[in-house]
Image: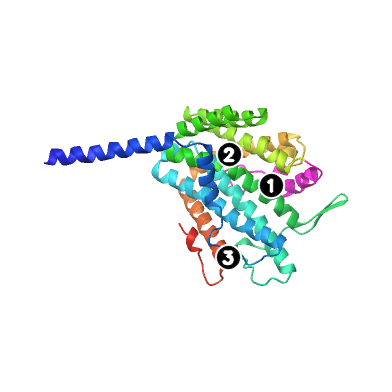
Amino acid sequence: MKYLSLLTVATVMLASVSAKAVECSDTDGKYWIDEAEALIQPKGYRFINVKPSLFTLELAVVQNSFITAAYSRLYQEEKKYAPERAKGYLWLPGAAFASFEVGQVIRHAYYAVAESRGVKNSFQPKTYGTNPLHDVILGHQTITSEQVAINLIEGNKAVYRDLYWQHMAASECGVGTIIRVLADMKKSSSTALDRSHYGQLENGWKLIREGKFEEGNFALTRVEQRIVLQPLIYTGPLAKIFGRLFAKIAVTPIKDPNFSFPSFSEFCRSNGLTVNFSNFDSRWMWIVEQMKEMGRFFAAHSRTLNAKHNSFMADSRTVVGYLNDPSVRFLGVQAE
């Protein structure tokens, strides 16, 4: 009987693994993209402001909080359940830090605009400090903190929508699955730009599968910067103005005297580069150096970073909860 029960357990386990394999092999890009999109939709959230600009900013605050939490949560799960595999997902922790910093600007803009329009119920956590972005005059043009926030909102969502679903697919079904899905998307693309886009992503994941973690993550990040963000944020009539402004505030949100994290402006001056964040070559060289140093930092401070990422998730729920109802600390539908 003991032999039979063990055989039964083994059969059930094999059936479960087989079912999972079939499920993963049936997924396509749309499946994972829809899964990722569902995570940042504010279901159950009650908006305070219905005026167009305030609604846009409030929605951005909420979605940025969900995006930061999603990055942090997936990284934490990989660190906990598959620490060796997590080495291939170096993009996630950096993305969480970057998204949190973008969220700071978006929240500050929302609070400032809400206050200027007499909205008194826009909770501002003390930990997020005071609004550092007032109207900025560069040359003959003025950029408001609201304009900066709206620009960052679009970039924050675009990067999430381009790369998070891939990490979700790789985490749940393996790197082979996302490589297959990207190859299919490349094959069915109707434009050369899309084929190049998916092809570069596919190559990045292939490098990660081969254990070339740094190279693979650089490849994914280059797509994020060159193909996703460059035309969206850093091209157009205000691109250079935004680029000059972002150059002033582009600082890696990590402080440690044992590691080198110069600001973008400092790095450009030291290397004879154009001090404008819209200049891809300058921005990319700074990002590469930051990512290399960040990788070493993550390896040295794993435990501290785990706590930091948990705080990102808690902060995200706190912001949404307080915005939704000052008497509720966490928004229930996003608590897990």
Q: Secondary structure at mark 2?
A: helix
Of circles 2 and 1, the one toward us is: 1
Q: Is residue 324 part of the magenta span, yes or no?
A: no
Spot occupied by residue 335 in the image (x, y as percentages of width and height) = 47, 59
Please give the name of the residue rendered at 22% of the width and 41% of the height, measured from the top-left corner. Answer: 9
Q: Residue 156 location, x and y as percent? A: 63, 48
Residue appearing at x 51%, y 55% in the figure: 313
Residue under pointer 1: 250
> Residue 262: which disc?
none
Q: Earlier in the sequence, mark 2 or mark 3?
A: 3
Q: Is residue 231 left or right of residue 292?
A: right
Q: Residue 161 appears in which quarter of the rendering?
A: top right
Mark 1 touches mark 3? (CB < 8 Å): no
Query: Which callout, 2 or 1, points at the residue further toward the start of the chain?
Result: 1
Circle 1 SS class: loop
The residue segment tinted magenta is: 236-265
Give the CA distance from mark 1 to mark 3: 33 Å
In the image, residue 264 lies in the stretch drawn in magenta: yes
Instruction: Give the residue drawn at x 67%, y 55%.
Output: 105
Where does label 3 land, which residue?
46
> Hey, what amino acid is under mark 1?
Ala
Q: Amino acid at mark 3?
A: Arg
Question: Which residue is denoted by mark 2 in the rendering?
Answer: 293
The first of marks 1 and 3 along the sequence is: 3
